Amino acid sequence: MEMSVKLSHPSSCLLLFFLLFSDHHSAAGTYIPGMSDAAARMFNRARKAKQAREFLNAHNTARESSGVPPLGWHKGLARFADKWAKQRKPDCSMQHSGGPYGENIFWYRQRKTWWPERVVMKWYEERFSYDSKTNSCASGEMCGHYTQIVWRDTTAVGCARVKCDEGRGFLVVCEYNPRGNYEGESPFDQTQ
């Protein structure tokens, strides 16, 4: 009996690969040692690449609607964000790294309700608290996450998400280069 499988989506190829080379016996009954680790690494890389695309697309959608150029994804920024987020895993504290980049941080409890696009859009909603005439946030409101996202001179972003210890939730960290939010400067001014 011959079997035909149509793989019309990249994720279906990954799933097939994962099933074929997971910790199971092959069709011939031969065990393939080490393939489960390789399949897990491949699956993890695919998951991270998908998450990166989601973060980048959400940022660029926000930037486009604000009239500023798109960002590029930067693996070094993503590694920095991941390293900082992992340092915060024990307490899930929304503490800034103090690093050389612009930085947005977000915490949430349930993963199923907060995907990358929603996190970025939550920051982007701060635009309603930003007054471009006075270049300031409304009294008692935050708008610095928004202004960092749309900072005209920023060209790259990298983000990471970690699950915190002891059910404390999830922490998202995004790094931006060049950084924004300079005192007295508008996010829409272009420096020469």
Image (cartoon, rainbow, N blue to C red):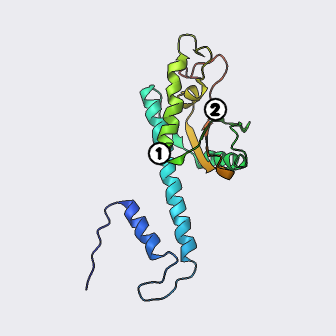
Q: Quarter-wise, where is residue 137 in the image?
A: top right
> Which residue occupies 51% across, 36% down?
120
Residue at x 66% of width, y 23% of height = 182
Seen at 60% across and 23% down, the residue is 142
- Residue 144 appears in which quarter of the rendering? top right
Q: Position of residue 128 (x, y in %)?
A: 50, 20
Determine whether the residue tagged by mark 2 lies in a helix, strand or loop. loop
The answer to whether residue 26 is left or right of residue 106 is left
Give residue 115's position: percent from left, percent from top: 49, 44
Q: Is residue 82 left or right of residue 187?
A: right
Location of the C terminus (image quadrant): top right
Side (left or right) of 157 relative to 184 = left
Q: For the residues carrying marks 2 and 1, which lies nearer the camera in this image?
A: 1
Which disc number belongs to residue 179?
Answer: 2
The answer to whether 171 is drawn above or below residue 30 in the figure is above
Q: Amino acid at mark 1?
A: Glu
- Would you call the spot at circle 1 few (<14 residues within 10 Å), some (14-19), or many (20 or more)? some
Considering depth in this image, is 88 or 178 the residue closer to the camera? 88
The one of 137 and 166 positioned closer to us in this rendering: 166
Residue, disc 1: 54
- Residue 147 position, x and y percent, is 57, 25
Q: Residue at x 68, y 52 (%)?
A: 166
Q: CA distance from mark 2 to mark 1?
A: 21 Å
Hey, what amino acid is under mark 2? Arg
